Image (cartoon, rainbow, N blue to C red):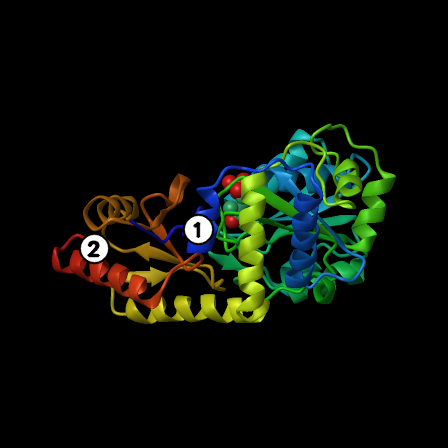
Amino acid sequence: MINFTVGPVQSSEKVRMIGAENVPYFRTPEFSAVMLENEKLIKEFAGAEENARAVFITGSGTASMEASVINMFGKEDKLLIVNGGSFGARFVEICEIHEIPHTAIMLEHGKKLTQDMLDNYRGQGFTGFLVNLHETSTGVLYDADMIGRFCREEGLLLVVDAISAFLADQFNMAQVGADIMITGSQKALACPPGISLIVMSERAVSRIESRKVSSLYFDLKSALKNAERGQTPFTPAVGTLLQINARLKEIKESGGVEAEHKKIAALAADFRERIADLPLDICSESLSNAVTPLAVRNCSAYDIFMIIKDEYDMWICPNGGDMRDKIFRVGHIGCLTVEDNKKLSDALHDLVKRNILK
Ligand SMILES: *Cc1c(COP(=O)(O)O)cnc(C)c1O
């Protein structure tokens, strides 16, 4: 199988080899050294300021979304949330469950956030802003600089879910002025699922340290305290953290975050060129390098996903809800090559010949 989904994605051989080994005991100086290196490299790749911190949460990306929100905000806050798809809706749900006052900016699927939309919310007492930099469900990448500027001007704390954008799209925490950046192990980090991580600006760290949170597992104060010595409060997904370490070092050795962007951008551009003649429409106003969202015209997108899986041994990414039959997505993250793109493009062209894709 070739995996063109947006997570879990294909891992490098080095990362896979680590998965075959026994998981070591972790309350050791050796594992602490790995974790301190993980924090350092993640901060570097996120473009975080010197005094920023990063913690690793054992839990998928959603765990870190929820942890970030409840550690940063409470009932006294008023949050603005960009809701352009299922991940934006998840931030809304987190605020509903924890009774944090919020307003959602609803976007039509595929549409980007504009300055005019943001300007409607000036001077209304908001204290924080939640956004999924790349709304993976629709394939829309928001303008981080525009959002960062708005938050600076309005004095809002900015939480960025960059789970699928990290390493795929240009993003620099310090430049944007983000207080929190979240990502997960199974997207462009190309490791197994199970770990997510939170990078915090100095301002976010002091806010978190001054607040009380009603959670044991998601109390970031204790995660921060433990991370000072390269440890975690509870048993983490030790094996995945070792894989993340290998992967971060691979990225560093092959030119760092810029080189990684370029690689993913080139794969995305190659794929988009190969399928330009197909009866498929790219359905996002603002594309991420991580994924190409494609609308079908006269067939079911879900059927295409099933046929590609069962007859061509490749996974593309289906959509859920009301987009199920209209849209499928092709990911460009993980260990993929131009040859892989060619195979998928050939399969899709074959489906046209067979009058299935039309
Ligand atoms: C994948 C993803 C998540 C996290 O989903 P999990 O299934 O909890 O890992 C969150 N936000 C975005 C934008 C994502 O792409």
Q: Is residue 305 left or right of residue 94?
A: left
Residue 245 on image: x %, y % = 58, 52
Numbered label attached to residue 357: 2
Furthest-left residue in this view:
354
Mark 2 or 1, closer to the camera: 1
Quarter assignment of residue 178:
bottom right
Depth check: 198 or 149 in front? 198
Residue labelled with disc 1: 6
Q: Is residue 127 left or right of residue 295?
A: right
Residue type of the residue flagged with mark 2:
Leu
Crowding at dot 1, Cα within 10 Å, few <14 / some 14-19 / many 20+, comes out as many
How many tags in the picture? 2
Q: Is mark 1 within 8 Å of ligand 1?
A: yes
Which numbered disc, 2 or 1, marks the residue that appears first in the sequence? 1
**In the displayed structure, would residue 188 be above or below residue 208?**
below
Label 1 sits on a secondary structure element that is: loop
Quarter assignment of residue 303:
top left
Label 2 sits on a secondary structure element that is: loop
Q: Is residue 356 left or right of residue 41?
A: left
